[in-house]
Image (cartoon, rainbow, N blue to C red):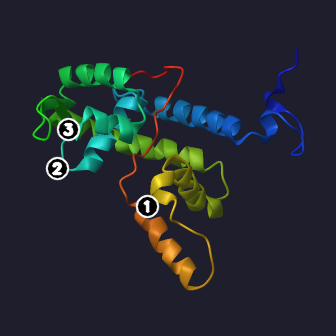
Amino acid sequence: MADKSQDGPAGSEGPARSAAYWLHRARQASDDLMAQALEGSGLTVRQLTVLEALAAAGDVPASQSDLVTSTGIDRSTLAEMIGRMEARGLVQRQRSTRDARANDVVLGTAGEEALSEARALAQAADGELLARLPKKHRDGFVLLLMRLAMPEAAGSLKTGKGKKRKKKKSKDKQLKDAGAPRMDARDSDGADAG
């Protein structure tokens, strides 16, 4: 049977008209580029995602539940990853000051160093991915992805003209600077489990 993944013209049905399908395929391409870029760093895409989330939290310790929310990595996978990352000194667990039953996770010294080195590699992979788009559409594309990934933060952003448009640009910048992780490592099939 013929492969329908490359189905016909824009008016046809099936994968050719499915945003979810093409987002999935784009994410696969992104993950492949990122995995290749990080190959010599000792980090996986998901580990980098966790380190970025911890760095974005700054001096505020993150609970494992916070990390589930900010990274999209499921709870059981994250718990295993944190254990392996802690053994390497990338992160440290400490008793939460907010909830005596929980542990907080903070960036370890080795994690800060690994993150610093991996960011340049990740930026290069990001650049390679975005180079597939016309230059004038790249920033807008990233903002649209952020709106899809974080609708609660982007829901108030409206397009319009005049003064409203200036306000929208300001909110888009705020969204961009809101500390969104540099990549989303969600993977329902368990690839790159960290």
Secondary structure beneath disc 2? loop
For image coordinates 24% across by 20% down, the residue present is 83
Vertical comparison of 115 with 168: above or below: above
In primary-sequence order, the first of circles 2 and 1 is 2
Question: Within 10 angstroms of label 2, few (less than 14), some, or many (20 or more) residues?
Answer: few
For image coordinates 56% across by 60% down, the residue present is 139
Q: Where is residue 192 in the image (x, y as percent from the top left)?
A: 45, 23
Please give the residue where the numbered disc 2 appears in the rendered image: 59
Do the numbered discs 2 and 3 sit on residues whose CB atoms are within 8 Å?
A: no
At label 1, the amino acid type is Leu
The disc at residue 107 is 3
Secondary structure beneath disc 1? helix
Q: Which of 96 and 93 is in front in this view?
A: 96
| Quadrant position of residue 21 | top right
- For the residues labelled 2 and 1, the Cα–Cα distance comes to 20 Å
* Residue farthest along the bottom direction in this orientation: 162
The disc at residue 54 is none
At label 2, the amino acid type is Asp
